[in-house]
Image (tube, rainbow, N blue to C red):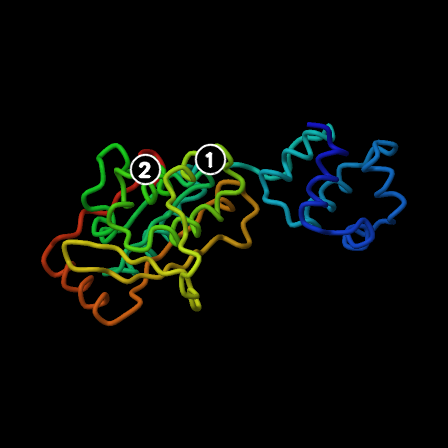
């Protein structure tokens, strides 16, 4: 990776001018111009300030540091490391506390790290090779052998999923092939993209929220996403509560060695 070109591409992609970035990073536009043209070699602290000012993901910040000839600043700790035991405990509490509604934790690639017992209601009927720890949740959501046959609004839901995969180009290209065309006369989506999912407990109307470790300075933690499914109406809330009461939920799942 050429540092000057990579920096310029990321600045342009975020629609930040040289002047704005220079002001954020505490330098001059002239100095930044020299860095982006390769005429000036930035120090380690300057590279850190520039990547922070662009609000790049921690993994990208490390990549740009390496490109500039410096060691990465941000650690990437395995999730099963003893030092992250409090994080694992917190995740377990959140997943359990969200019951009787489904919730999952995925890593930066979208692979399943952990899920609460209610997630079994979402995955029912999906092919075994798509379900479980380490499997890709985005592929599960859109694959014809996954949730797709049960998603009543697949076109709009799929586009919501694909919009989140800009950094995973190969996966996005694969999944885009499964997406049906969106009806141009489709009604506005409202305040959130809904998921209308057929199930043995009736049609479930769900919305989702995504939570991240916003203050994380470790690559592993920064890339974790906790996605919680919430009932969009009373009937769905009742159905999920009833499913929990019948023992229909599977045990909580966790990726081997992670949790």
Q: Position of residue 209 (x, y in %)?
A: 41, 59
Mark 2 surroundings within 10 Å by alpha-carbon count, few (fewer than 14), some (14 through 19), many (20 or more): some
| In the image, farthest residue toward the front | 185
Q: Secondary structure at mark 1?
A: helix
Q: Position of residue 134 (x, y in %)?
A: 34, 35
Question: Which of 106/157 is in front?
Answer: 157
Confirm whether residue 131 shows in the render.
Answer: no
| In the image, farthest residue toward the right | 30
Q: Position of residue 9 (x, y in %)?
A: 71, 39
Q: Quadrant of residue 206?
A: bottom left
232 displayed left or right of 26? left
Q: Which residue is mark 2?
A: 255
| In the image, farthest residue toward the bottom | 234
Mark 1 surroundings within 10 Å by alpha-carbon count, few (fewer than 14), some (14 through 19), many (20 or more): few
Q: Which residue is mark 1?
A: 173
145 displayed left or right of 21? left
Question: Which of 16/65 is in front?
Answer: 16
Question: Residue at point 81% right, 50% down?
Answer: 22
Q: Quadrant of residue 194?
A: bottom left
Quarter of the figure with the N terminus: top right
């Amino acid at each position: 990776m050429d540092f000057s070109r990579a920096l310029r591409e990321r600045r342009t992609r975020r629609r930040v001018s040289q002047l704005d970035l220079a002001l954020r990073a505490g330098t001059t536009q002239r100095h930044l111009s020299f860095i982006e043209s390769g005429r000036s070699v930035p120090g380690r602290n300057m590279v850190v300030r520039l990547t922070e000012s662009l609000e790049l993901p921690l993994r990208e910040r490390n990549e740009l540091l390496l490109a500039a000839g410096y060691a990465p600043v941000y650690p990437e700790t395995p999730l099963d490391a003893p030092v992250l035991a409090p994080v694992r405990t917190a995740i377990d509490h959140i997943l359990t506390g969200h019951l009787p509604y489904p919730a999952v934790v995925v890593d930066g690639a979208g692979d399943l790290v952990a899920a609460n017992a209610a997630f079994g209601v979402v995955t029912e009927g999906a092919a075994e090779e798509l379900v479980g720890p380490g499997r890709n949740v985005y592929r599960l959501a859109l694959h014809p052998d996954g949730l797709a046959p049960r998603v009543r609004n697949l076109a709009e839901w799929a586009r919501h999923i694909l919009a989140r995969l800009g950094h995973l180009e190969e996966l996005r290209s694969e999944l885009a092939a499964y997406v049906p065309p969106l009806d141009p006369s489709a009604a506005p989506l409202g305040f959130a993209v809904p998921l209308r999912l057929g199930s043995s407990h009736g049609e479930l109307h769900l919305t989702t929220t995504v939570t991240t470790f916003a203050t994380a300075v470790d690559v592993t933690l920064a890339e974790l996403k906790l996605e919680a499914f919430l009932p969009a109406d009373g009937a769905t809330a009742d159905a999920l509560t009833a499913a929990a009461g019948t023992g229909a939920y599977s045990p909580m799942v966790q990726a081997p060695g992670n949790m």
